[in-house]
Amino acid sequence: MVRPGLLLSLCLLAFGPAPALASPPPVAETRAYVESSYVIAPYEVEDFTLVRSSYNPDDRLAGAGFSYRSDLHPEAAISVFVYPAGRLDPQVAVDRGIQALQADLRQAVASGIYAQLQELGREPFQLSPRAVPAKGANDIDSAVIQAIAKAEQVRGEKLRLSLLQVSRKQPLHSNGYLFYKQLHFFKLRISANQSDLPREAFDVLADRATRSLIPALEVANVGSCASATLYVDPDAAPEQGAIQLASQLTQQNGYNCHASTEKADIQARAGKASVIEIAYEAGDWKSQ
């Protein structure tokens, strides 16, 4: 990790007369923003074991799916879906993703898969307790640290549900969680028979599964997204420019983009995880 004071110094060095940063000349794209995405799902995460992976190349924009089972609570069905979102404002992405999840649930009811659907609550969901950023040597250092901490946050929401699975005539506890990270949506669905777990115990398990699995799964992207142009206000004071650069650098790192598969070090991860390559066509990411 770069020390805050050093980061501020680097940002200040990068922030020069800066019209070039603020208004770069157009550059012709020679490759897609994302050519391939490698979805990496560990075989084991704490007491959760991967039991199935799925991906349909003919429906690549639907992404990849993974089913996990808890050794402590095998009665719960846990599925994680990872699919492309694009380069979006994190909160906008989460809002779109959760609305799509709600629409999918309504469609499942209309199709006769579920009945008696009840939304018991929707709320922001933190993957880890929000840490208080450390204080820097001065006010600007502290502002840079806070900007980095904000840009590092993975935004997410939780949807608590109760529903009936029509085919088995079985009432279910169910939760849906939606996150935006690494240019993708990460959706976790977990369900259990209401007769198997009290609601409170189910919610504890569901939250724990989410906080274990979502950070463990990742997407490594390969394409021109590995190269970024950073923009700063040419009229901003150098210190404010440093804050803008720190925020953008952190956000860019969070995209987990690489110039090549080799630089993404995919082979090294394949021994302990299911790795699914999503190879995109040229136009899939052209608007990003």
Image: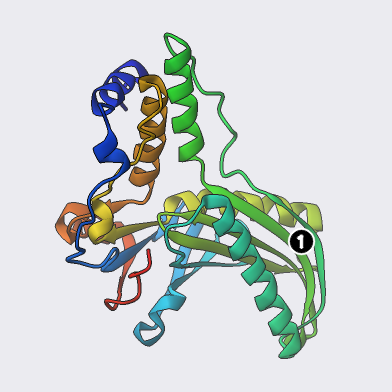
Q: Is residue 245 above or below residue 259?
A: above
The residue nearer to you, when weighing 273 against 69, is 273
Amino acid type shown at disc 1: Leu
Q: Is mark 1 on a helix, strand or loop?
A: loop
Is 236 positioned to the left or the right of 180 in the image?
left
> Compared with residue 281, is residue 21 higher up or lower down, i.e. above or below?
above
Residue 79 screen position, x and y as percent = 55, 68
Q: Can residue 47 be seen in this view?
A: no
Query: Is 1 on the left or on the right of 199, as rendered?
Result: left
The image quarter in which residue 63 lies? bottom left
User: At x 44% / y 13%, what residue is drawn?
Assistant: 136
Specify the color scheme.
rainbow
Asked if residue 199 shows in the view, the reply is yes
> Between residues 19 and 58, which one lies in front from this camera angle?
19
Residue displayed at 47% across by 18% down: 142
Pick the quarter of the image with the C terminus.
Answer: bottom left
Instruction: Tell me where residue 182 appears, x and y as whole percent.
Output: 40, 54
Residue 149 as seen in the image, left or right of residue 34: right
Q: Would you say 146 lies left or right of 102 here?
A: left
The percent coordinates of residue 74 (x first, y second) are 61, 65
Q: Quadrant of residue 109?
A: bottom right
Please give the residue where the numbered disc 1 appears in the rendered image: 197
User: Compared to 8, does 33 lie above or below?
Assistant: below
Q: Which residue is drawn at 20% across and 57% down?
A: 27
Work out which quarter of the rendered image holds the N terminus and state it: top left
Residue displayed at 37% across by 68% down: 287
* Residue 275 coordinates in the image, percent (x, y): 31, 66
**Neighbour tally class for label 1: few under 14, some 14-19, many 20 plus, Cα within 10 Å:** some
